[in-house]
Amino acid sequence: METTPKTTGSFESFDGTPIYYEVRGEGEPLILVYGIACIINHWHHQTEYFSKKYQVITFDLRGHQKSNPIMDMNQISMEALSKDILGLMAHLKIKKAHFAGHSFGAPIILKVYDENPHVFFSMTFINGFAKNPIKGMFGLDVIEPFFYFVKSQYESQPDLWNTLWKLAVDNPMSMYLAALAGGFNLKVTHFKDIEVYMRGVARLNLEVFLTMFEVLMEYDGEPVLEKIQVPALIISGEKDMVTPIRFQYHFKEKIKHSEFVLVPYGSHCTQLDFPDYTNLKIEKFLEDAKVES
């Protein structure tokens, strides 16, 4: 299988934290932003497909995978994540780009747009949300209390909980549980992709995860939605139980002139479940966005 050559590197962000990135292809820049505790591999179908026409940039969020160590643990915030992306653009000498965000990548994009709308050609949201998606997740109100319980226990016994975290995540059963919760569609997603993902999650520092998860719950990007003036595409997986379809319908209602695509049987990782369909929809959207600009 033919693959597009990639360039890899890292740069020091505003606080000295190294941010790892990969660049493939040439053309208008397309920056892909994954969600919390995710990995660049989540985008592998998109990087290969779009690098034939675009300069595709993927990177690790601070504290994730190769973007380590975080030099100042107080700098885990939406502001820091936004500065990392702007720093990446400056490092690569990119003035303007198309953006696509999956899950927590969506509010990160909203944060960047809120303060720097001039760097956007367009934006694509895949199973995203604008504010705390935890309340009522799976039809229950137990996730948030459970999170704060784990956080308090971690703070009292960090070594024990780091060990438990790695044992729990790097376990074949956890892959099936993630799928059962709507994170993947086991009928169409390659098992290796799920396995690579779970190994990546196991390597994530639990303190980083807990801190960033709290940032996720506290951020409210609702006011940004009605400000968006660039073309926007909203993609929703029909079977996503993590960020159900109501979140994407809300995006469609609030963002003027936005497009909405429902992916039948799509899970939370629609771009892995049905990459061909997802890529075709994004490609058409990007081509139309070029015409509008």
Image: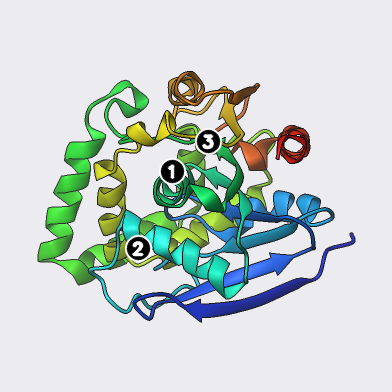
The image shows residue 232 at horizontal and vertical percentages of 59, 33
| Residue shown at 54% from the left, 45% from the top | 101
Marks 2/1: CA–CA distance: 13 Å
Q: Which mark is residue 268?
A: 3
Q: Quadrant of residue 71?
A: bottom left
Callout 2: helix, strand or loop?
Answer: helix
In the picture of the structure, the residue carrying the numbered disc 1 is 110
- Residue at the spot 32% in from the left edge and 46% down from the top edge: 216
On the image, the x and y values in percent for residue 125 come to: 55, 37
Horizontally, residue 78 falls left or right of residue 154, namely: right
> Along the polypeptide, which appears first: circle 2 or circle 1?
2
Q: Nearer the viewer, residue 12 or 169?
A: 12
Which numbered marker is on residue 80? 2
Quadrant housing residue 219: top left
Give whichever of discs 2 and 3 has the lower sequence position.
2
Secondary structure beneath dot 1 equals helix
Asked if residue 89 is positioned above or below residue 251 in the image, the reply reads: below
The answer to whether the residues at label 2 and label 1 have Cβ atoms under 8 Å apart is no
Amino acid found under the numbered disc labelled 1: Leu
Seen at 44% across and 51% down, the residue is: 112
Q: Position of residue 255 (x, y in %)?
A: 49, 26
